[in-house]
Image (tube, grey):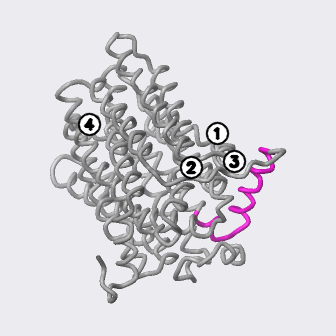
Amino acid sequence: MTSPGTPPTARRRAALWRHRDFRQLWVGDTIAQFGYQVGQVVLPLLAISALQVSPGQMGLLGAAENAAFLLVGLPAGAWVDRMRKRPLMIAMDLTRAVLLLTVPVVAWLGALTLAHLLVVALAIGVCTVFFDVGYQSYLPGLVGREHLVEGNAKLQASQTVAALAGPALGGGLTQALSAASALVATTVGYLSSALSLSRIRTGEQAPERKQTPNLRAEVAEGLRFVFGNRLLVAITACTSTANFFGGVVNASFVLFLSGVVGLSPGQIGLVIGVQALGGVLGALVAGRVGDWLGGARAIWVSTLVTSPFGLLVPLAAPGWPLVLSTFGFVVTGIGVVVYNVAQVSFRQAVCPDALLGRMNASIRFVVWGTLPLGSLAGGLIGEWAGVRTALWVGVGGTVLSALWVVCSPLRRMRDVPNAPEEVVAAG
């Protein structure tokens, strides 16, 4: 119980701790994220160990995992706005579990191919598009707009704790058992997420059905809302640029640790897990940083201050250079999580309910659509110039991405606007 003298921010946090249905969403997401993080390490390790993939093929696999945002990202928002979000998310969890289970089964039969991995990665990506757009559109109605920053911070904390332990667990399972067996953990995560979501009791009102739905017009309405406002344009440009160069890093990093630094699968999982410590710290302080700096100011300060530490990452080598590189990733992890909590909460707070799905989908189409392009670019750079050079390109571009928000009207704002009408006026 909170006393009358408890600060308003603390009372809001206490209210969310008592919110049963939010806890169900939180628990389900946490378990799913553990499975996802295990898969993020195990799938590339399986491709390396079973198929001996090249840097270019690894880039292609990374592109397949994220290509769905380009293929179905925009219409997904219009479709999600027509549906109840919770049943959609449950269906996507179950579908992802079935799809992923085919990988270890085929591997155990000795019939695994790169084509199979690419198809599964692409199909899971399509499900993830619908799940993520649905989830970001569902949260405001579940917890209320006044709890968005804390809700996003708690969910981000779960994701980053999973990112801390999941890769180490995945690397350890791969070394102790096999990469194919370790993938089963991801399947269990998706099933557990579906079970938790099914236990949410809060009713969800069905969206109003239009007599003559027009998919093209609905998609265009979402795009106009996003790209008609300079604040949302700046956020979208910053995130998409950072994700493009993050794709370059992701396509090269596991190969870099394995082939250049010479780490074992277990050591690779441990390094990636330790790097996620920054995300845990970022999730713990994101709400306080937003209170201290202001919700709008936290968006650009977080990325400007922390992204330069990423330049330590390509310096990795056995011994102290690896420690220094990992420290760089820890600091950038803090900034990424604070930035994400701030910018997602900003977007949700300023968007009308009827446009949430299309707003989220429009932005995610751009910001996640750059990931496969970055992965392809990272693979090509790794083939031509080496994976360390690809890392330099990736972290350098990530640092420069901060300029989009630093040079935008966000720099003159402190707090998130109180209503959607204010952001329309700001554009």
Crowd rating for badge 2 (residues with CA inside 10 Å; few <14, some 14–19, many 20+) = many
Q: Which mark is residue 78?
A: 3
Q: CA distance from mark 2 to mark 4?
A: 27 Å
Placement of 212 over or under 65, stated as above or below: below
Task: Provide residue 156's location: percent of width, then percent of height.
Answer: 39, 58
**Is residue 255 at least partly visible in the picture?**
no
Boundaries of the magenta span: 214-235
Q: CA distance from mark 3 to mark 2?
A: 10 Å
The residue under label 4 is 170
Q: CA distance from mark 1 to mark 3?
A: 11 Å
Tell me the SS state at disc 4. helix
Q: Which mark is residue 133?
A: 2
The residue under label 1 is 72
Q: CA distance from mark 4 to mark 1?
A: 30 Å
Q: Which mark sits nearer the N-terminus, 2 or 4?
A: 2
Q: Amino acid at mark 1?
A: Val
Q: Amino acid at mark 3?
A: Ala
Q: Amino acid at mark 2?
A: Val
Q: Which mark sits nearer the N-terminus, 3 or 4?
A: 3
Q: Residue furthest bottom?
A: 5
Tell me the SS state at disc 2. helix
Q: Amino acid at mark 4?
A: Gly
Q: Are marks 3 and 4 in contact (CB under 8 Å)?
A: no
Q: CA distance from mark 2 to mark 1?
A: 11 Å
Q: Which mark sits nearer the N-terminus, 2 or 1?
A: 1
Q: Which mark sits nearer the N-terminus, 3 or 2?
A: 3
Could you tell me which residue is drawn at 35 percent across and 65 percent down? 18
Placement of 241 over or under 308, stated as above or below: above
**Is residue 405 at least partly visible in the picture?**
yes
